[in-house]
Image (tube, helix red, strand yellow):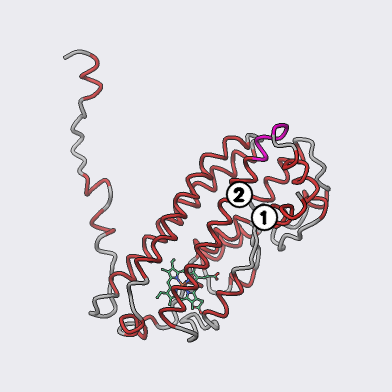
Amino acid sequence: MDAKTDQNTPQDTGMTYAEYLSLDKILSAQTQLSDTHDEMLFLIIHQTAELWMKQILHEVTLAQSFIQADTPGAAHKPLSRVSRIQTIMTLAWDVLSTMTPTDYLTFRDQLGTSSGFQSFQFRELEYRLGLKNPKYLAPHAGDVRAHLETVLAAPSVYDETLMAMRRAGFDIPEAVASRDWAEPYTPSEAIEAVWLEVYRHPEKHWEYYQLGEKLMDLEDAFITWRFKHLTTVERIIGHKMGTGGSAGVGYLQGTLSKRCFPELWSIRTQL
Ligand code: HEM
């Protein structure tokens, strides 16, 4: 056997496909509360969304570490991957919308007060991207809450970006770099001016210009996901209250105006 064949021949380690993927755990985790047909789809749509959120957090962590290390160009790749995952997550609403209100009503009562409000990965993602609102800690307790509190008190991807830009010589005020990370971010003209400089001279600031666009891709897709959640919810439950106790569609409509990277949006008008 020559060296080339050797390299291409897999070694039998005894590991199987099912073992590697822990399929026994994953495929036995669809615990239905009812014997209705559509509950399986409801479970699987939520579980896959949680798995994708896990992967997104994994990518955002990597991107953030590159930004911290003053290599913003290296953050482009993980952020591009996030956008592609978001495309899949948004498409998933089309699958869920094959579930009619009548189908959903066959098992909705069984859900009690459980709700997407309790998705700790979703809240971690919001905090990591810069939407710092402590009121969303309320549904969480124990280790999960402690973890979310740590994330809330740490700089977001956007905070890290602005600090890296400061180290790179951009005119970022000291107050922005030393703010209380747990507080909601306040947009400012000073940061707008910095991004305007980047967008007016992309060739001079290529890595930050590209980073700005990757962050825009992410936020644009996030808003699209929120919008499809809203329309899917409206076609399934109309204007009923949510299982988490909110006004339902009315509450979700309010979340559409949230912005993680406000100056990246506002400079568009001025360019
Ligand atoms: C029949 C399908 C669905 C309905 C009727 C529905 C309804 C709602 C409603 C009414 C809320 C507002 C909070 C509340 O009062 O409960 C909400 C929040 C939420 N839902 Fe859904 N949802 C559905 C599917 C999904 C799926 C598949 C996901 C995927 C993970 C999801 C994730 C979330 C998240 C993360 C929130 C919190 C949003 C925020 O605070 O911005 N939902 N949902």
Instruction: Find residue 56 and report its horizontal and vertical position in percent.
Output: 48, 52
Q: Which residues are magenta?
A: 203-209
Quadrant for the N terminus, please: top left
Q: Position of residue 105 (x, y in %)?
A: 34, 85
Q: Residues within 10 Å of mark 1 (few under 14, many from 20)?
A: many
For the image, the number of numbered tags is: 2
Which residue occupies the foreground of this view, 181 or 97? Answer: 97
Q: Measured from the top left, where is residue 213 in percent x and y? A: 62, 46
Left/right of residue 233 with respect to residue 258 in the rendered view: left
Q: Is residue 14 magenta?
A: no
Question: How far apart are the two marked residues, 2 and 1, measured between alpha carbons?
Answer: 8 Å
Does mark 1's beta carbon lie closer than 8 Å to ligand 1?
A: no
Q: Label 2 amino acid?
A: Leu
CA neighbours of label 2 inside 10 A, class few (<14), some (14 to 19), many (20+)? many
Residue 132 drawn above or below residue 21? below
Which is nearer the eye, 206 or 107? Answer: 206
| Quadrant of residue 185 within the rendered picture | bottom right
Q: What label sits on residue 215 in the rendered view? A: 2
Element at label 1: loop
Q: In the figure, 239 relative to 130: above or below?
A: below
Percent coordinates x, y for residue 62 in the rendering:
54, 42
* Residue indicated by mark 1: 261
Q: Is residue 143 visible?
A: no
Q: Is residue 5 rendered to the left or right of residue 42?
A: left
Seen from this angle, which residue lies furthest left? 1
- Whether the residues at callouts 2 and 1 have beta carbons within 8 Å, the answer is yes
Looking at the image, which is closer to me, 267 or 207? 267
Task: Residue at 82% x, 42% y: name it.
Answer: 171
